[in-house]
Structure formats: C-alpha cells, structure tokens
Amino acid sequence: MNGKRAILLIGAVLLLLAAAALLWYFFFRESEEKAIRRTFSAVTELVRKNGEKKPLDEAGDFRGLQKLMAENITLSGGSRYPSGDFRTDDLLRMFIQGRKFLQTLSVEIHDMEIRVADDGRTASVSFSLTVSGRPLRGEEGLFREFFDCRASLAKRGRGDWILTAASLEPVIRRHDS
C-alpha cells in the first residue's frame, strides 16, 4: 500500500509541475513582441525631457540608452539628419548635448509592426514616430515632426532586444494636423 501511495503522490506532484509549467508558458512568459515593445517603451522614456535635467540624470539616461543599443549602430536619416555607421557612445553624446538646448522633448510611437526572424535572434520593426518639444531659448513655440521609421534589432544573451539599425524618413504633414 505504501508503494502505491508514493507512486500516486509522485505522479500528482509531477502533474502539478507540468500544469504550472504550461500555465507559465502560455500566460506569464513574455512574448518576443512584448519584449521588443518594452525596449521601445524604455527608449521613449529615456529620451523624454521635461524641464532642466541635472547632470546625474543626463548620465543615467545615457547609460540606460547605451544598454538598449548595440555597440555600433547604422542610421539613415535622409538629407536632414546624420546617416552612416556610428559608435553608439558617440551618437548618444551628440544626442545628450543636443537635448540640452531643449526645454521639453517627447517621442511617441504609433502603428508598430514587428516581424521576428525565423531564427528568433533578429527582428525588424516598422512604426510611425512623432517627435515634439520646445526650444530652451530663441525660437518660440513647439516643434513637431513626423517620421516613418524602420529599425533592426538583435537579441542579446538574456533575451533582451537591442537596436542595431534605424532609418527615419521625414513625413510632411499639413499644418493643421
């Protein structure tokens, strides 16, 4: 009798473990699409500026953005923006320096379409981007620019997605939109 109980108990434990694994896999495991969206959400938060930023905050944003990008990144910005292969550190230094001239800066991503490659290690993302802000001095009023974008991402060791390339195509909008 004790042998049968032990077998039943072991079987019940194994069944519970299998059920827990299936529950985790189908309901709690983060999909690749969610992980990629999380990367873009983190970038928009780190890019955002509302008022004066202290040097430590700027350094924190720099380090945060650095973790979300490959060591080298390829940019295509048409004729108005930098294009080419850049060391991420150099690109981020230029961005942080330029952001100092803005009182506010925000980035909004819309209509994101994600395609993960069959190997699960790379992905391409298409989206619309709105960049808006207010200069610190001089020019008055808000600026607002619209872009159609494509980005390439690679999966890093622990499953985090990092940006490897980006293409920004300016979109002309009517003034009243």
Image (cartoon, grey):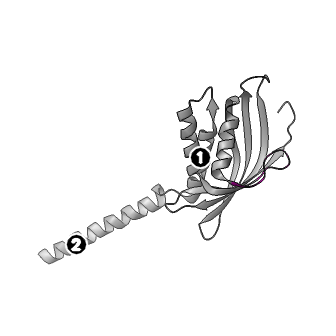
Picture quadrant where residue 4 is located: bottom left
Residue plotted at (86% across, 41% down): 172
Q: Residues within 10 Å of mark 2 (few under 14, many from 20)?
A: few
| Residue type beneath disc 1 | Leu
Label 1 secondary element:
helix
Task: Identify the residue under disc 1.
Answer: 65
Which residue ends up furthest to the left in the rendered image? 1
Q: Is residue 102 above or below residue 166?
A: above
| Magenta span of residues | 76-86
Q: Earlier in the sequence, mark 1 or mark 2?
A: 2
Q: Residues within 10 Å of mark 1 (few under 14, many from 20)?
A: many
Residue plotted at (67% across, 32% down): 100
Residue plotted at (78% across, 31% down): 143
| Residue type beneath disc 2 | Leu
Task: Identify the residue under disc 2.
Answer: 8
Label 2 secondary element:
helix
